[in-house]
Amino acid sequence: MTVGVVVARTIGGALIAVGVGGMIAKARLRAKYPPPGHVIDVGGYRLHLDCQGACPPTVILEAGLGVEASLSWRHVQRAASEFARVCVYDRAGNGWSDASPRSRTAEVMVDELRSLLTGANISGPFILVAHSYGGLVSRLYAATHPEEVAGMVLVDSAHEDQMNRFPQEAVASVDLEKMTKMMSLLSYVFSTGVPALLHSRIPLQTDLPEPLARTARALLASSRKGVATMVAEQNGLRESQDQVRAVRDLGETPLVVLSHGKPTPLPKGRTITPDVERRYEETWQALQAELAALSTRGELIVAKESGHVIQLDEPGLVVEAIRRLTEKVST
């Protein structure tokens, strides 16, 4: 037997051993971190829904992009459940939810959310509370089913026109095509099970506190669907923006828009000057004001001590906004 054959067999055996170890590690993580709520069939695949509290009305928390994003609502959910029924869910392919065979656009997500609520026997009126990308989904839900929505809180929400209006230097600094390719490669890596062996070192998009960060890393490491879904949601972003752009008006729906007070750092680069950062921030705040103007009963509040994830930086502001809307619905 040649040295080359021995080396090849050794490497092959090592790869098999790592792969088997990764599969075992993934299974252990899934067992250690079970879903806190229920998984409900929405047409051949299941979505995870976790509701706390019993008082009407029902509050639906909609997360931004990222497999771990729904975990960012934990503090808000716990506090608001003292005066309302508060439900957080994972969009298909995220968290504890199954992957979906359907495209990842806001229109599909609205349909999936409605199927989830119907399957869980949860009826409106709802108060929709949405962060970042989730703002597109919640706004489209409100436009599609206005009779079911009693109020809305947008938390540093995405705007359908933001990429067209941000300074082009800032847009160019984020190479979405390169990012998508990298995420697709990561999806393959996660399918091998190797990340499950090193899950404690996995970086997260959201700076979650412990032990939520441990749960988020376990969810990422135990399946490839989370990374694949991030790619799919990103690829469907322009279509989602077009869907929301067609239904801008929220009529008289009570609306609170919370915008960050601490500027969002832009990627470091030669073209990112202080002037670009200033214009980027001014544009973001202008877009948030436009969101508040979508309703004749809209209000804009700047969260002075918060970055983009206000529900973690200043959860009390989000809870208070929810409380105010629940009181309006109840009177």
Image: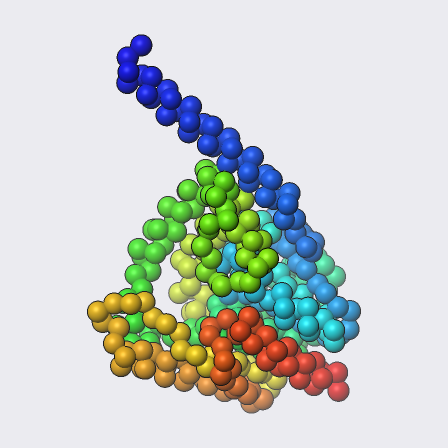
Q: Nearer the viewer, residue 319 or 230?
A: 319
Q: Quadrant of residue 250?
A: bottom right
x, y percentage for residue 52? Answer: 72, 65
The N terminus sits in image quarter:
top left
x, y percentage for residue 327? Answer: 71, 84
Residue in the picture at 30% in, 55% down: 178
Which residue is situated farthest in the right direction here?
Answer: 54
Which residue is situated farthest in the bottom direction here?
Answer: 296
The C terminus sits in image quarter:
bottom right
Circle count: 0
- Residue 294 in view in this figure: no
Relative horizontal placement of residue 159, taking residue 270 as reference (left or right):
right
Q: Quadrant of residue 49?
A: bottom right
Which residue is situated farthest in the left direction here?
Answer: 270
Q: Nearer the viewer, residue 57 or 69?
A: 69
Q: Is residue 272 shown above or below 22? A: below
x, y percentage for residue 278? Answer: 32, 82
Residue in the picture at 55% in, 70% down: 312
